[in-house]
Image: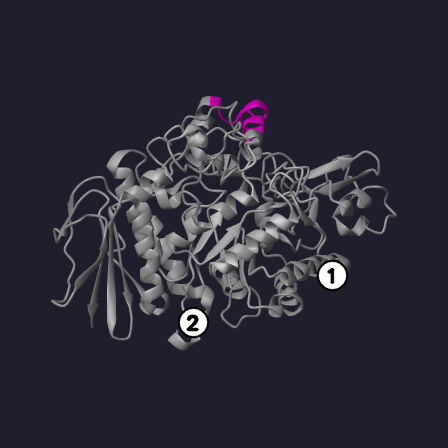
Amino acid sequence: MEKTDIKWWQQAVVYQIYPRSFQDTNHDGIGDLKGIEQHLDYVKELGADVIWLNPIYDSPNKDNGYDISDYEAINPEFGSMQDFEDLLAAAHERGLKIVMDLVVNHTSDQHQWFIESRSNQENGKRDFYIWRDPVDGHEPNNWGSFFSGPAWKFDEATGQYYLHLFAEGQPDLNWQNEAVRDAVFGMMNRWVDKGIDGFRMDVISLISKPEGLPDGQVPEGGTYGNSNDAVANGPHVHEYLQEMRQRVLNNADLMTVGEASNVDIENAKRYSNLNGQELNMVFQFEHMELDENPNPALGKWYDQRVPLPLLKENLTKWQEELANQAWNSLYWSNHDQPRIVSRYGASQGEERVLSAKMLGTLLHFMQGTPYIYQGEEIGMTNAYNLDWDDFDDIEIKNARKYLVDQDHLIDADTLLRYVHYKGRDNARTPMQWNQEENAGFTTGQPWLKLNDNYDEVNVAAALADKDSIFYHYQKLIKLRHELPIITTGRYELIDPHDDAVYTYKRVGDDEELLVINNFNDETLVREYELPDNASLLISNYDDDQGKTLRPFESKVYRYQK
């Protein structure tokens, strides 16, 4: 990649905000837009360039805002449209960009389109959604919902089933209908006209359903067909995204990232090709799915760590095979993933700090656009103190309902252990600002129970400690902005079979970086060839012991070729 070809979003760092859990200003226990505006200087101090907001649209919140009832209204829990416009203006004043979450695979069942669609079979909006007659008295096919259970809901009033790949309250839009695309693109353009800076597109790889809606493969021990395999990367998805590019995305200098379920390398090259026909980049899940249960009927629910060589192999594949053709999103954490320090590092004490810095270093020196999820920069951990009565997430609740209570595939105690490792509510506990009541998040009753370690893990403590995870992330971001090699250099893996240390190079025209990361909580010895002119660029220890690597030690050397 030539330095002159670099786009702004290739050097940017994104900070993801989950509005419900960021900062409450009106004492109702729910984060809001004014709370985000209140902390813009914090994001700016960290050094991030872009804020990605999880959905803030009007919604009945059956899936925390991913069930949208009005794309052009703000959820009153978060504030008003004026509050959003104030936030956008305040962000832009600070040189921060705002990327909105776009959820157009499905709407809420309370969206006006669906209310009309389900009113009768002759309604003009009927074809906005995917309706089918019963087959032999049951669902039209065997697809399962991503949230457990069937992907079809029977509507007594009109005698047909509607498709919902997610919750019953999230009916899938029919993208084959040109009127649906017209409505979606019109809505997007109105947000662009407001001055937003881009879109993160929820499950965008699912918008084109396969012709005939064939059955999916039922995993051994499972009840329903795999709808992800059946639907993802459908026959017209690239056609639809190219139409979106022409009708919306070319109208401004936008950043676009598509959440692409079940995407492989070849499809990713099409979604995020550097020719600019579709999206800038995609979120792929392969590295997040390496620790799934060996019993496919249990899917993600498991608690065993991934062998490091397997993680290396996967991340390396994406680094090497997208190079000079497409663009990577770099992420460890988001609202759908557990806290990375609990998944690959350590959750307590000094090892939490060291491992969080190590994981940040490993990711931020790769090629792609890094995403930091709120709290990652202070090393927030999984919330082991949450019990069944505390969880809010529909995915967790449905797992208990179907996997434990209905299908008896697993016992409740084992599932709870898995939820403490992989559940989405680990990421959604309120932001930990200080040691005060409710971690400074709210003076009301928090919508979700807080992680009980906020007296130790909080922003105030991080800002007061010059050696904190926050300042390490700040350095990582500054280096990305200053050193073109991090954006343009070639990636080269060292020692792929080492099961304790992940080391790689970034290779430029006249310089190289050597990035060394000890994933182990033990002291190890590793020797790498370094020229005499090598200098230590960044480390999570305050001295360098050469070939001796201490627990979770991470360091980067820079040298001329």
Q: Residue furthest right?
A: 122
Colour mapping used in the image: one colour
Q: Which residues are magenta?
A: 399-412
Residue 120 sits above or below residue 235 on the image: above
Q: Is residue 299 left or right of residue 531?
A: right
Mark 1: which amino acid? Asp
Which residue is identified by label 1? 182
Mark 2: which amino acid? Ile
Residue 220 sits above or below residue 84 on the image: above
Give yes or no for residue 407 being in the magenta stretch.
yes
Q: How many marks are shown on the rendered structure?
A: 2
The residue lying toward the viewer, choosing from 161 and 188, is 188
Residue 56, horizontal then vertical, whole percent: 60, 46
Name which residue lies at 50% across and 24% down: 388
Q: Main secondary structure of the magenta part?
A: helix
Q: Is residue 95 left or right of residue 237?
A: left
The residue lying toward the viewer, choosing from 306 and 431, is 431
Q: Quadrant of the C terminus?
A: bottom left
Q: Is residue 179 left or right of residue 99?
A: right
Name which residue lies at 51% across and 64% down: 280
Which residue is identified by label 2? 6
Is residue 108 among the parts visible in the rendering?
A: yes
Q: Quadrant of residue 183?
A: bottom right
Measure the alpha-carbon separation of dots 2 and 1.
32 Å
Residue 192, horizontal then vertical, whole percent: 63, 62
Mark 2 lies on a secondary structure that is loop
